[in-house]
Image (cartoon, rainbow, N blue to C red):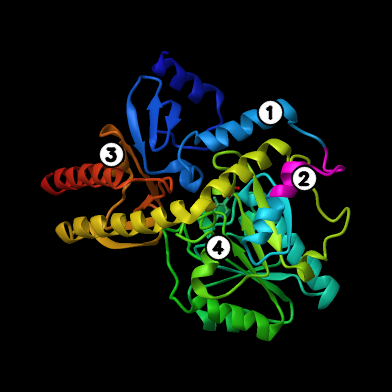
Amino acid sequence: MDTKKLIEDSEHYLMNTYKRFPVVLRKGRGLKVWGTDGKEYLDFVGGIAVNCLGHCHPKVVVAIQKQAQRLLHVSNLYHIEPQIRLAKLLVEHSFADKVFFCNSGAEANEAAIKLARKYAKDNIGPDRYEIITAIGSFHGRTLGALTATGQEKFHKGFEPLCPGFRYVAFDDLDAIRNAVNKKTCAIMLEPIQGEMGVRMPGEDYLKGVREICDKEGILLILDEVQTGMGRTGKLFAYEHYGIQPDIMSLAKGLGGGVAIGAMLATRAVAAAFQPGSHAATFGGNPLACAAAVATIETLLEDGFILDNCKRMGRYLMHEIEDIKKEFLSLVVDVRGKGLLIGMELTRDCSSIVMDMLKKGVLINCTSGNVLRFTPPLIVTEKDIEHLTIALGEVFHELHAG
Ligand SMILES: *Cc1c(COP(=O)(O)O)cnc(C)c1O
């Protein structure tokens, strides 16, 4: 396979929405992926928190194969077996009573925004539509989710955005108290701001937000598109903070590599959606749901994978803390929960990602100067040693140069 020609064609035929690295990945197993040139990589990106069970996990692959032979698609005008099983699993393992399925994180957030508005209009008053979101948040690229995203750099060029959003500083309860008004219907937050560089709020923040919501009679929407599905060591990140949301969005890891999104809510809130309120042609299709059922069942099987996520998260954090101590002029901060870990640098990190790629390790750079590690939750100590040795070498070369 001619990699150079493939990359030429990629640049020729695809819209220029991603700055892509010069590799074409064509095969993966577990933590490993291989390029068309035969080169092997250790994947600490994992599709950015998507491949929670690693690449081509046999349980997920077999579930897809079986479902593909049985039924690929039917309309949501009919009941769909794997969709029912998936909804039941999600409800049994979360705060929620009801689930709506769609195909991506942005779409799940759109559904959450619409449900919050509809619930507030039906139950509180006709002028309750405003949603408070956090500065530095990321909720997706469709216009509603983009407006909810509290980062100007993503808005630029796409104005006018949607009315009805208000932004406050993250991890600041007074900012929320000051922003709530007669129009507010919900507060929408990520438990940890992944895209913004794995920004962690204080331990009591979400509890405080929950209290404000209860006092004001408004809804708490948690965007767990990145933090959900075991990423932080619990199935959902809200479980760490002793609270429950009213609405939650999921996607990324949900299908173990297959595109699927979900919006979950309590019974009272979900009741605002009636036939015709919202829909998605492919939402909850048999193929994606079969993959997601296999993914959740595997994730929860005897707790082994969540436990591994916690242990390997601590180990990875410990190892990169050591690197930080050695390179205090390069590393500002190391933070995260489970296997969502950020390493903030004093400099732009794109060249480091490139140097790591050359050494056969895939890592991600977000927010300009934060290295983000989101490996499959099945990562081993040996994989982490491989990563940290390569990272140490790259930092040494930088330091010397
Ligand atoms: C990735 C992400 C999204 C967007 O998901 P898509 O599937 O790309 O639409 C939304 N919210 C958060 C927190 C994310 O990390």
**Mark 2 touching mark 3, by CB under 8 A?**
no
Q: At which x and y percent is residue 231?
A: 47, 55
Question: Which of label 1 and label 2 is nearer to you?
Answer: 1
x%, y% of residue 179? 61, 79
- Give me the residue at 48% from left, 74% from top: 171
Q: Quadrant of the N terminus?
A: top left
Residue at the far top: name it: 1
Tell me the SS state at disc 2: loop
Of the pair 221 and 307, the residue shown nearer to us: 307
Foreground mark, 4 or 2, reads 2
Q: Which residue is mark 4?
A: 150
Amino acid beneath label 4: Gly
Q: Earlier in the sequence, mark 1 or mark 2?
A: 1
Q: Secondary structure at mark 4?
A: loop
For this view, does 183 lie left or right of residue 191?
right
Q: Is residue 160 visible?
A: no
Q: Is residue 182 left or right of residue 190?
A: right
| Spatial separation of the CA atoms under disc 2 and disc 3 | 40 Å
Q: Give whichever of discs 3 and 1 has the lower sequence position.
A: 1
Q: Is residue 115 visible?
A: yes
Residue at the image position 80 percent from the left and 66 percent from the top:
118
Magenta part of the protein: which range?
A: 75-85
Q: Which residue is mark 3?
A: 356
Q: Going by the picture, which residue comes out furthest to the front? A: 302
Residue at x-position 53% and y-position 37%: 17
The residue to which callout 1 is attached is 68
The residue labelled by disc 2 is 280
Say if disc 1 is inside 8 Å of ligand 1. no
Indicate whether 393 appears above or below 67: below
